Amino acid sequence: MAEIPFQGGETAGGTSHASFRALFAWCLFDWANSAFPTVIITFVFAAYFTQGVAADVVTGTAQWGYAMAVSALAVALSAPFCGAMADHSGRRKPWLLVLTVLCATTTFLLWFTRPDPADALWALICVGVANFAFEMGQVFYNSMLPDLSPKAKVGRISGWGWGLGYAGGLACLGLVLVGFVETDEPWFGLAKDQAQNLRAVAPLTAIWFAVFAVPLFALTPDTAATGIGAGEAFRRGLAALWETLKHIKDYAQIARFLLARMIYTDGLNTLFAFGGIYAAGTFGMDFSELIIFGIGMNVTAGLGAALFAWIDDWIGPKRTILIAVTALTLFGGALLFVQSKTFFWVFGLPLGIFIGPAQAAS
């Protein structure tokens, strides 16, 4: 079957745009990898770790925070260099493949985390490595879009990807709820003693990620290789990064944007890392309630991403980000003062509407 080109002209990267099939496969990768932050980092495994694995909730929350901080620091130190190196080598998919395999593998290994403080270090190492691989994978995944999408539709397609990602997180959470949590007989004959039903969310997420990532590697074209070997790309990438840092004053607007993005992205990452833990610890939500809340958040986030995918092309990414960050600050600030579970839902669900636009427009 002949591929149908996606109408819209030259890509942001100056190349011929990809087919609709290739763009859909690119978007589907978001469906694949969004299960990881949704199920592991935010709503299920994080709460299992703090309430069932760690010595106590306070200790577990602190340990989880340390793991997230270390992985985030590793990403912050690695991403600029790896991005510069990828620019010189051209290709993105080999890097993305390695990071996808690493994330899926270490996520799968979380299955071996028993409800025992002795397993806390194992869980923290696995989740830290998995989170690092996930975030680094996003660097290479996002950098593919300018060479795939028509220039005028980058914001829209990015929003579609985020929207599909939230749908994927919702679908995976639904499977977790039906198959492992809200049931007297968990799938595959798993027992609830030793928390087998909760530990099973790790291999489920890993397999989900691996399977749905395949279309991108099979159908989406990679950025053309430059012909430069890995060693030379390493050297040139390091040199380019150093030159950029030396002349950072010449890129004042970009530097300000990156600083601002770092601040609000760190805020979003904190929300993801501790949202489920906060809901469980402060409002006494059990795993079923956490998952249902997560499903609701993914519904509102998907709707927000889809809506702002069109608005982004209309008003531009800067205004989109400003609207999203302002709304996130207002609703997120309100959550610090509410004292009932009802109001947590009232102010928590609208947060999702603006999470997607803040990420997609960046």
Image: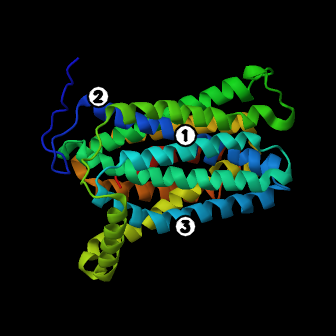
Q: What amino acid is at disc 3? A: Leu
Question: In terms of sequence position, does the residue under pointer 3 or pointer 1 come before the other?
Answer: 3
Q: What amino acid is at disc 1? A: Met
Q: In this picture, is 180 found above or below 14?
A: above
Extreme residue toward the top, this view: 1
Q: What amino acid is at disc 2? A: Arg
Q: Is residue 79 visible?
A: yes
Query: Residue 339: x percent and y percent?
Result: 71, 53
In space, the residues marked 3 and 1 are separated at their CA atoms by 27 Å
Query: Residue 171: x percent and y percent?
Result: 54, 29
In space, the residues marked 2 and 1 are separated at their CA atoms by 28 Å
For disc 1, the marked residue is: 297
Left or right, 162 with respect to 173, comes to: left
For disc 2, the marked residue is: 21
Question: Residue 260 is drawn in which quadrant?
Answer: bottom left
| Mark 1 residue element | helix
| Mark 2 residue element | helix
Question: In terms of sequence position, does the residue under pointer 2 or pointer 3 come before the other?
Answer: 2
Q: Which quarter shows the N terminus?
A: top left
Left or right, 217 with respect to 269, comes to: left
Question: Residue 338 is drawn in which quadrant?
Answer: bottom right
Query: Residue 314: x percent and y percent?
Result: 22, 47
For image coordinates 85% across by 53% down, the residue present is 118
Q: In this picture, is 84 found above or below 351?
A: below
In space, the residues marked 2 and 3 are separated at their CA atoms by 36 Å
Q: Is residue 299 visible?
A: no
Q: Do the residues labelled 2 and 3 touch (CB within 8 Å)?
A: no
For disc 3, the marked residue is: 73
